[in-house]
């Protein structure tokens, strides 16, 4: 068609050809301007239906008017040929340009693409084929998105054939690959791919053919960009990785937000001078002279004046960081002019990822010379690792398997941690482990200069305990009023070695955490700060975690009082959401260690079948908040998961045969949790605080029909509410836990008529997680022991003569199988089985033995057994560690100015 005239357009040259048309450069002889013409291919023009769809989408594109979108001048027809008249863009495609992009250029291009997409999405137009060939970069630097020929209006029918996919391999979203309905979030995923490629030079999903690429897009997480380009900081990594979330609900929800995030990052990074250091040998850092050492008890009150930072430190640390080798290296990415503040990131050894579950497991030594962190290898084995900041090597500490929440001794010679239900210490150079105390669910500890360790041993223990670092008896040093549903967590000593801070966490459903102060002599525990957790003192300031941000506020450790206003120090911090633990620590000389880049929402989980040998087979990945329930026919799972829109939790079912999920409850903004199947499989019981009250027992038909009904309403003297746990084999009784203050009482609800759960007689101990025996005559449960927080596994008659027997002195999550009881041993971190026989009306128990030949991991819990599959139903907690990266802020007190 070159040199031909169509209507009043003279064809000058062919610009390109795609699946939905051929594009020519042309001269508009009426208006004397250069334009581009896009013609519908002849094989499509033959179909009136396809021609109509072409015109419809062209009209949708023509409604867009934005500097970053190629303008549509008109839609015309000549001699039966339909074509679109478009703005002619004189420049290069991103495909041609991307090999020479700097980070600054990549950010600028990404922002413009995001803003163009945001404008299109506001008009209801989705591109569906964002790729480098469809992005033009003009000579003046303006970026324009081309070819909305594949765009569709919300609710309009697909342009492609039934069941086919639209897009280009490598840039398609998971929903496109799977042929599902798409919306604007599909474009956001493709934008994330573009950003990733521009910043690293590589696609996030690779394969030798399209099928392999498609598999990666749907099933494989992309590696962090920082693992490919060490100049990419965690903040930028997170922005891109959030665009690449597999689930559209978890993806960044608008292109406009992507633009805002990229602009914010560009603005903040422009305030710093991005530095690259070169040299031939390591340089030892000068001492960090940030005021007096707080451990001496002589730390000066916080001053907003400039602190006496050592300038040689900055250069020394920068050079030291450069020479840390292979995957372990820290990269100084910025030094903030005029402040001495240096920011650096720390890698992990090859094949090891940072263990960031439950709020993270890292700590910097008091003198700022070393860090300790949890590392997970490719076989999911967890150990503590130590890294000196003046060395290129990290080393694993033997005998620290499955260790959590490490903490340092004041002299840096030892490290404390929790493992296998115990509080333990080990030399920082390695060696034997010293066990100090029981701590079945340890949640933080701190080591004073006088050799005392204060620790939290369990989730629902209202006390903090002290023990000598050399061993000996424990004693209570602080308590909270458990009737208010607050429990202490993560203590941290003040400089005098006598007083300590800690978080009080509301586990009664309020999602609240406050900061308290206490002392070793057992004084009162006044609250000093609301809506805060993970308190640490350093350099005249109280650091704490609040809503994803590390905050700092002036604090006098002698009067133990706050001054001034809180100041944001660092955002995007890994956390054990929604409360209790932000992933950071501080040295006494002005270094802040934190993990950024991970979500602050609940950890992901994976339903698995576990066979008799301990081999696991994945069923479904989701986020589960409480115990799932296996249907009586073993073909369905009922579980709860978060509702991203309402912020609540809903009950869902998953059909194992059909591979289909279905939402059962719609109670937003209230939550529905803890599903339990009826014995005939027709109903599901659950708890809900519908209307903002206390948890009540509800029931709904399992097929989703009809409305839910309230069977027992939590009210009166009940503090938290009623929580169903199991149904008797005859379907008449529902076991219920009555949450009252810090204690859970066992009760039953007669489903034939009563509306108030009746406490079970003769149990003598409170308990939770009760399950029926196969014949319905007995129950197994976990007892409550308030002092230690441990729970004994107990068996009791359900009805009839009283009697209670101990199955094991510790453990959790008991279930009853055909010939015995399975529970998780907290001290052994192994799944355990005890056989039961009955003689003379009393149970006899075999010695406990491990359920599987090897450990299936302390992150796996069992909730049922399928006779037909000869496998256990388990839930495996998945760590988001691949997204978290440890980082340093040197001279952080300057941020308080």
Image: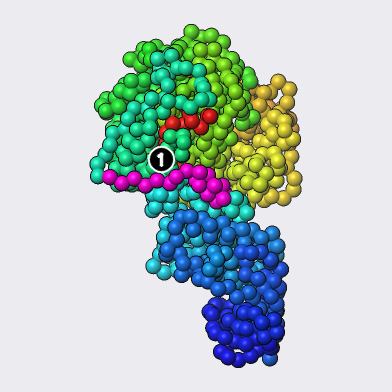
- In the foreground, 456 or 310: 310
Does the image show residue 747?
A: no
- Can you identify the residue that label 1 sits on? 344
* Figure disc tally: 1
Which residue corresponds to the image point at 62% horizontal and 70% vertical from the top-left? Answer: 70
Q: Mark 1: which secondary structure?
A: strand
> Is 613 rendered above or below residue 137?
above
Quarter holding the N terminus is bottom right
Does the image show residue 170?
A: yes
Q: Is residue 882 left or right of residue 54?
A: left
- In the foreground, 341 or 486: 341
Residue sitting at the far front: 338
| Colour theme | rainbow
> Is 668 rendered above or below residue 468?
below
| Place of residue 352 in the rendered image (x, y in percent of width and height, measured from the top left) | 35, 44
Q: Is residue 270 magenta?
A: yes
What crowding class fits label 1: few (fewer than 14 Cα within 10 Å), some (14-19), or many (20 or more)? Answer: many
Q: Which residues are magenta?
A: 261-279
Quarter-of-image position of residue 222: bottom left
> Is 352 rendered above or below residue 15?
above
- In the foreground, 269 or 118: 269
Q: Is residue 573 left or right of residue 226?
A: right
Which residue corresponds to the image point at 47% horizontal and 43% vertical from the top-left? Answer: 272
Which residue corresponds to the image point at 46% horizontal and 23% vertical from the top-left? Answer: 538
| Place of residue 398 in the rendered image (x, y in percent of width and height, measured from the top left) | 28, 32
- In the foreground, 600 or 34: 34
Which residue corresponds to the image point at 70% horizontal and 41% vertical from the top-left? Answer: 669
| Place of residue 752 in the rendered image (x, y in percent of width and height, measured from the top left) | 72, 34
Q: Is residue 294 magenta?
A: no
| Place of residue 347 in the rendered image (x, y in percent of width and height, measured from the top left) | 37, 43
């Amino acid at each position: 068609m070159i040199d031909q005239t169509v209507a009043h357009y003279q064809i000058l040259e062919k610009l390109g050809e795609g699946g939905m048309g051929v594009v020519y450069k042309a001269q508009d002889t009426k208006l004397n301007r250069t334009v581009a013409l896009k013609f519908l291919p002849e094989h499509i023009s033959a179909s009136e239906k396809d021609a109509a769809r072409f015109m419809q989408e062209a009209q949708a594109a023509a409604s867009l008017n934005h500097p970053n979108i190629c303008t549509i001048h008109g839609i015309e027809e000549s001699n039966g040929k339909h074509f679109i008249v478009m703005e002619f863009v004189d420049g290069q495609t991103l495909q041609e340009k991307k090999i020479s992009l700097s980070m600054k250029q990549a950010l600028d291009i990404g922002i413009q693409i995001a803003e163009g997409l945001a404008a299109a999405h506001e008009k209801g137009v989705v591109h569906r084929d964002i790729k480098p060939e469809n992005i033009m970069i003009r000579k003046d630097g303006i970026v324009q998105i081309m070819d909305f020929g594949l765009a569709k209006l919300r609710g309009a029918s697909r342009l492609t054939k039934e069941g086919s996919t639209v897009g280009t391999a490598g840039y398609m979203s998971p929903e496109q690959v799977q042929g599902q309905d798409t919306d604007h979030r599909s474009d956001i995923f493709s934008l994330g791919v573009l950003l990733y490629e521009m910043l690293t030079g590589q696609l996030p999903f690779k394969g030798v053919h399209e099928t392999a690429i498609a598999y990666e897009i749907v099933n494989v997480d992309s590696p962090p960009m920082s693992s490919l380009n060490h100049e990419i900081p965690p903040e930028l990594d997170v922005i891109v990785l959030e665009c690449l979330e597999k689930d559209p609900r978890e993806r960044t929800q608008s292109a406009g937000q992507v633009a805002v995030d990229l602009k914010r990052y560009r603005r903040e990074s422009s305030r710093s001078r991005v530095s690259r250091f070169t040299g031939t040998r390591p340089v030892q850092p000068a001492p960090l002279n940030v005021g007096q050492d707080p451990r001496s008890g002589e730390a000066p009150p916080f001053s907003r004046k400039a602190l006496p930072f050592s300038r040689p430190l900055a250069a020394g640390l920068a050079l030291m960081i450069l020479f840390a080798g292979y995957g372990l290296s820290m990269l100084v990415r910025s030094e903030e002019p005029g402040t001495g503040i240096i920011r650096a990131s720390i890698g992990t050894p090859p094949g090891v990822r940072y263990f960031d579950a439950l709020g993270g497991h890292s700590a910097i030594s008091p003198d700022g010379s070393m860090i300790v962190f949890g590392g997970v290898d490719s076989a999911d084995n967890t150990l503590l690792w130590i890294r000196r900041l003046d060395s290129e090597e990290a080393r694993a500490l033997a005998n620290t398997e499955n260790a959590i929440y490490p903490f340092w001794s004041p002299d840096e010679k030892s490290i404390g941690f929790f493992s296998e239900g115990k509080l333990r210490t080990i030399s920082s150079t390695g060696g034997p482990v010293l066990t100090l105390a029981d701590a079945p669910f340890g949640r933080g500890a701190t080591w004073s200069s006088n050799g005392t360790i204060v620790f939290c041993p369990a989730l629902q223990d209202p006390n903090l305990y002290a023990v000598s670092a050399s061993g000996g008896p424990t004693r209570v040093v602080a308590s909270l009023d458990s009737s208010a549903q607050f429990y202490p967590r993560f203590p941290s000593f003040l400089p005098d070695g006598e007083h300590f801070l800690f978080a009080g966490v509301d586990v009664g459903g309020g999602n609240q955490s406050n900061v308290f102060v206490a002392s070793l002599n057992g004084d009162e525990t006044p609250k000093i700060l609301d809506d805060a957790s993970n308190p640490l003192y350093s350099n005249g300031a109280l650091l704490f975690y609040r809503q994803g941000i590390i905050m700092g506020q002036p604090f006098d450790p002698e009067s133990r009082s706050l001054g001034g206003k809180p100041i944001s120090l660092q955002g995007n911090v890994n956390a054990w959401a929604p409360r209790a633990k932000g992933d950071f620590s501080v040295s006494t000389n002005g270094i802040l260690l934190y993990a950024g880049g991970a979500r602050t929402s609940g950890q992901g989980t994976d339903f698995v079948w576990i066979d008799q040998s301990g081999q696991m087979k994945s069923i479904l990945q989701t986020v589960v908040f409480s115990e799932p329930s296996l249907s009586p026919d073993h073909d369905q799972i009922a579980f709860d998961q978060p509702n991203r829109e309402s912020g609540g939790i809903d009950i869902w079912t998953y059909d194992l045969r059909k591979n289909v999920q279905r939402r059962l409850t719609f109670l937003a903004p209230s939550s529905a949790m803890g599903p339990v199947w009826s014995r005939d499989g027709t109903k599901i019981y659950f708890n809900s605080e519908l209307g903002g009250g206390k948890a009540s027992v509800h029931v709904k038909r399992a097929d989703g029909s009809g409305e839910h009904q309230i069977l027992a309403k939590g009210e009166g003297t009940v503090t938290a509410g009623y929580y169903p746990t199991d149904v008797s084999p005859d379907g008449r009784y529902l076991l219920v836990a009555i949450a009252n203050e810090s204690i859970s009482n066992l009760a039953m609800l007669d489903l034939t008529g009563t509306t108030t759960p009746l406490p079970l007689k003769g149990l003598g101990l409170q308990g939770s997680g009760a399950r029926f025996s196969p014949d319905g005559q007995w129950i197994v449960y976990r007892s409550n022991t308030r002092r230690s927080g441990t729970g004994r596994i107990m068996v009791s008659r359900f009805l009839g003569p009283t009697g209670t027997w101990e199955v094991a002195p510790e453990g959790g999550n008991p279930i009853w199988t055909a010939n015995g009881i399975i529970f998780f041993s907290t001290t052994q971190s192994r799944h355990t089985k005890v056989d039961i026989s009955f003689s003379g009306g009393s149970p006899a128990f075999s010695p406990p033995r491990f359920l599987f030949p090897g450990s299936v991991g302390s992150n796996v819990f069992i909730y049922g057994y399928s006779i037909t599959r000869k496998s256990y139903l388990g839930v495996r907690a998945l760590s988001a560690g691949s997204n978290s990266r440890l980082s340093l802020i040197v001279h952080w007190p300057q941020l308080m100015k």
